[in-house]
Structure formats: C-alpha cells, structure tokens
Amino acid sequence: MKTRTQIVMSFAYAAVMTGASNALAQPASFDKGVDASIQEAERAIEELNAASRARVKEKRPATQPTATAIRRPIRMRAPCNLNGNTQFFQIPYIGFCGAVHGSLTGFIGKDFATEDITFTTQRLPAYRFGWRGLGLSAAAPMMYYWKNPLVRNTTSGAYTGTYSMVNFLAFRNTDYGTISMFINAGLFARTAKNYQGETRITLNQIYGNYWRGALDQAWVQWGGLRVGLQPSLFSFSRTGYTFMPGYASYMTTPAVSYTHRFDNLNILPGLLPRLGASISISAEDPTLRRYPDGVLSRYPTGMGYPDLVGQVRVGAPAFVIHASGAMHEIRDVSANAYNSFAPKNATWGWAAQLAGEYRWKWSSLVGPIGGNMYGKAMLSATATQGALSYLGIPYMSIDYVSSSYGTIQRSSGQAIMGSYEHLWTPVFKTSITGAAFQTFMGSSAEFLGFGNAAFGFNTQVRGQRVVGNAEYWAGDGWALGLEGGWTWSQANGQYLGGRGLPVAVNFPNVLTYMRKAF
Amino acid sequence: MSRTILFLTAVFLLAGAVSAPAQVATQSAPFNFAIGISSGSQSSVDLSQTGFVNVYYGIQDSNLANQAVVDQTGVNNYSQMQQVGSSTGVYTATPGFADGGPRFGAQNLAAVTQNGVENSSQITQMGGTNVAAVAQNSSVGNGSVRRVQAPTDGPIYQSYNTPDGYLSLFTTDSMSLAIWTPPGLTATNSFGRMH
C-alpha cells in the first residue's frame, strides 16, 4: 500500500514531495519510456541544488563578496536525510550520500509489418572534371523509394528482450554548492531477425561498443555545471507516456551543460504558485545526431564542432513549458569522394522544439465525479533543417543531399507528438500517444551530360503513429503492461517535374511487458 | 519542346556497361524520358518509345563503335545524341588532360526514326566513320530486341547484378527510372526503418 500511495503522489505533484524548486525538473512519471528511477534521481538532484543554494544564500550577507565569503559547511539535519527521504545512505570516508535504484523489465512483442519502405540512394554517372581530366564518374544524386518485402523475414514470429537498469546517485554538499554524480547502466537487449529470418540476440551498441551501449548516463554535476553522458538538453522529458515512442527525440549524449535556475519568480503567485524558470546551454556530441546515407551525404570521421543546444523552461508544480534549439554542423565529404574536384563544403543545420506538460487531478476540474483520478498530457512540436535526428523519427530521412559539385541541400522536416495518461485508480492507468512527421529531401538539378535536361529529385516522407497502453501495478514494485500500436508511413517523389506514385505501408504491433522496480 | 521535358512523368535512363553489349529498352508510358550514357569497347543502344512525349538523350563514348537506334512514336519526339568514340583512329594530344584528352576515331552509327506531329533530332558524331540517318514522320519501326521491359503495374524497385553491370529499376504506374551502369561509375546505398 505504501508503494501505491507513492505512485499516486508522484503522479499528482512530485514537486510537493521534494520542494518547490523541482517544478522545473523532468515531469514526474512512473512509466518506463524513461525509467522512473532516473526521473526520481533527477528530482532529487534538483532538490539538492536548490536546497543547497537556498541555505548558502541565507547565510551570506548581502554585501559580502561571494569569493571571500566565510561560510560554514552545510549540514543536513541528519546524515543523508533529505527532507525526510531516507533512501540515501552514507558512503564511508568520502562524505557522500548515495542511493541505488533500478528496474528489471522483460517484454515480448509482435511486429506485424510484412513490408516497409526502403530508400535507395545512388549517384548517376555523368561527365565531370577530375584529376584525370574529363570523364564519367558517380555524380548526380538520385533517390528511389520502394516497398521492401524482405521485412517480413525480420518480423516473422515474436521478439523478446529486456530493458533493465541500475542507477546510482551520490551527492555531497559543500560551501560552493552540491557535488553530485549519477550513473545509469543496464542490459538493453532483444531478439531480432535478419533478412534470412535467422534469429539473433542483439545487445545495444553505440559506436560499435557494447560497453557504451550499456551505459545510459554517467555524469558529475557541480551546481549547475554538468559534465558527462547525460540527457540532451534539446529533449523534453520523454517520447510520450507509452512504452513505444512517439515522434520526439530523447537521447543521452556526451555533453557539457550549464543550467541557471530562477526559483520562485513570484509572478502572479495566486494563479501560478511557486513559478520558476531555468536557462541552459550545452555542447553535445554531434556524431550521435548525424543522419547520413554514405552516398548522397557523408560526414567525415571525427567530431568537428559540437552541437550547440539551448533550453528555456518555465514551470510550476502542475506544468512545465519547454523551448529548445540546436545548431548542428554539416560537413560533407561525399561529393569529393566520387569527384575529386568537388569541394568539401560545410554548413549548419538547426532544430527547434516547443513542448509542454500539464498535470491535474480530475476532481479539481469536474468535481466529485472525478473521484481519485489524475491526468497528465504532453505535447511537443519540432522543426528542423539539416538535423533530422532531432525529430525523433525512424531512419527514413537523411540530413542533406550533396550535389556532385559539393553544394549542400539541407533536408527539412517537422514532427508533432501528443500523449495523455489517465490514472483510473491508484494501481491502474492507461495512456495514448499520437504522433506525425513529414520530411523533405531533394537534390539540386544537375546536368548529366552536355546540354541535356537538368536531373534532380524531391522526396517527401510522411508518417503517423498511434499507441495505446494499459498498465497495472501488482504491488511491491511489480507492474504489468499491455500495449498496441499502429504505424503508417508514405514516401512520394518528384523527378524532373514529374510526380511519382506514393508508396505507403502500415502495420500494427503489440507488446506486453513486466517490470520490477527496486 | 524542351519545356515539355519539365512535365514528364515517365523517366527511363540507361548508362552503358564497359563491355557494352546491346542495351535495349522499350518505354510505353504516356511520357517517356531516356538518358543513355555508355563507354567501353563498344556501345549499342536500341530504344523504342511510344507515348505522347518521347525524349531521348544519349552519350556514347566507346572506343571502337557506337551504335544507336532510336524509335519514337508520339506527338512530340525529341532526340539528341553525342557519339564520341575514343582510343582508335586519330589521337589528339590535349594539354591538361592526364590521359591525353579526347581521341576521336571510332565508328559511329545513329539511326533515328520519329513518327509524330513535332519531331526534332540532333546528332553530334566525332568518330573516324560517322553514319547518321534520321527519318521523321515515318511509320518504319526499328525491330529492336526488348531486353528490358519496365513493368507498369505498380510501384516496384528491383536491382540486379548482371554481366553488363549494375541495373536498378524503379517503376510506378506513371513513371519509370532505370540505371544501368558499369561498376565504378556509380555508388549506391540503402536505408530505412529498422524492425
């Protein structure tokens, strides 16, 4: 019963449990699109920072310079007792408090797709000047889209897997703010089939490394400065309340970020109690945000400039409004790879997102008929040019198309996602996520020979997805979920002004999972 | 006529193989567009287009013999081809070209038959032996061997590794696009959603 009560409290106003400042933390949730234990750790960290800053402020005379302030160390009321939260334990010798959480999730599902859209890119032969003079080379960009029937081999039968993790949070208060660290690692694996229908067990990999694929987050934070593998500032809290994601980006990335918070803005306190805001900037790993195909677009190896991301959030216990933007460097080497005279051009792509979440108790809206039910809803809208990864869509578009002369034509796209979660009883909830996206990829028209018609393409990709979820808590951290979704996608092209026929696919999928949180 | 190209909904493209056996295609969509690029020892194109608008543009740069037979039947027919030829016959040393520059001297044969209201044909030959024949408003067919027939029963993509090279064929109800290239003159890749 204690667990169930905590769930309801978390759902309603997690901020109430942890203080006013955490209104700006990731929105409270107990579903596992993003593990709840991670969000709980996030809230605890925000609380630590805010509490520490408040205490320091109280002890510092207004006229006393910060650098020379003589302050006594911040002491907690009891060792590692944070506002009554007894989950932290003291780590011997180093003075840190720590907490361990985690979850074990097993799932089994079925993907009913028998075919899907595949995109084939090609450089058509054309006469271009190179080091060997005028000659035929792979030059003019072309893109086809087609239904790939081999997908049915990869989706035959059911798949199963696990999404299990352990996270460790440690912190220590100092005169100069709270130092905290967080690690989240786990086993992310599932069965998958290849085009021959052979079953394989796949472990998550990043950069071809299993250890990196198992490490979700690992960072240290001092005040507002955070360094390490952490959630991208561009992302809102999650990709919908369902297990299967909507079209919104959520990823963790190596980054250096800084967040400045404005607690208790005291603007319309009657209407917006405990209103706060935060401004954040970060430099993030650009390689995880690259969507090339290798033929029409190819990035060089190495980092280049990091992605520059900014975020502004305004929130109160019941809502969060999020705005973020990102700049993504594009450096192309594909044209030069096939045509030695083509320059290696570079430009910048961008992405912007506006999102928000609102939580409420139904009885406060509709009276007693609302009973003990709670609701929360989130909405996000994202637009990009040249940085398609920020849309959070499947790998059905590329960042840009490079002409044979090295000219970069950035792809563009938009995505929207809405999700609603309804808590019927303290142990049962349902949620639904709807999402849609569209992208445009195209090439500059090029002459293949001498004096013929310019040849180019424009391809539009669209997609929609609806996912429904029901989850039941059996107590003691056990949860059982059932989910079903429907996905629709379409590609359409235009060549030399002529329009090709659209190719569309749609397929349902179902998923059930069991989770044990600790 | 050139403006008509912008409204084409049928596209057919051929690029010749290095070994250059005959590359033959038939197009019967309302709007047909063909581009043929070939090189190698010999090049032979046999193209038949039937539709409202038919356009063919070709470059043949084989070093022994270039042969093209184009049959267009429609309202607007347009054909433009360049037959270059190289490595036999007269050698022209051109500064700035690593391989000595263009060398003209192959045998070039072009035969265009156009049956329509508006016909236009332009042939440029730079070989040792050049033969060109253009017949307009003629009902004479070319009797070509139809080796590649573009299906028109729905969106489809197919690719083949053939002795002649790499053939990718993309067709919908209203348009078709095929690339027939020798290895080394093209680059391909595919991507899509993972399941």
Image: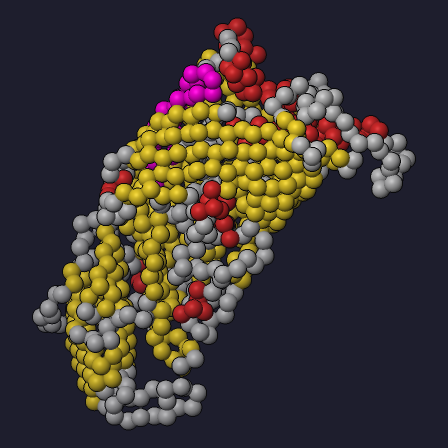
A378 sits left or right of B63 in the view: right
Residue at 19%, 53% (x, y): give it.
B152
In which quadrant of the rendered image does the N terminus of chain B lie?
bottom left
Q: Position of residue B92 (x, y in %)?
A: 34, 92
Q: Is residue A475 visible?
A: yes
Q: Is residue A488 magenta?
A: yes
B79 with respect to B73 (left or right): right
Image point 48% across, 25% down: which residue?
A: A517
Task: From the top left corner, tell me how far across and down residue B90 is, in percent.
Answer: 28, 93
Instruction: Tell me which corner region of the image, top left, top right, bottom left or bottom right, holds residue A513.
Output: top left
The residue positioned 84% from the left and 33% from the top of the image is A71
Whether A324 is among the magenta residues is no
Where is the C terminus of chain B found, in terms of image quarters?
A: top left
* Location of residue A187 by image quarter: top left
Q: Which residues are magenta?
A: A465-489
**Most common secondary structure along the magenta stretch:** strand
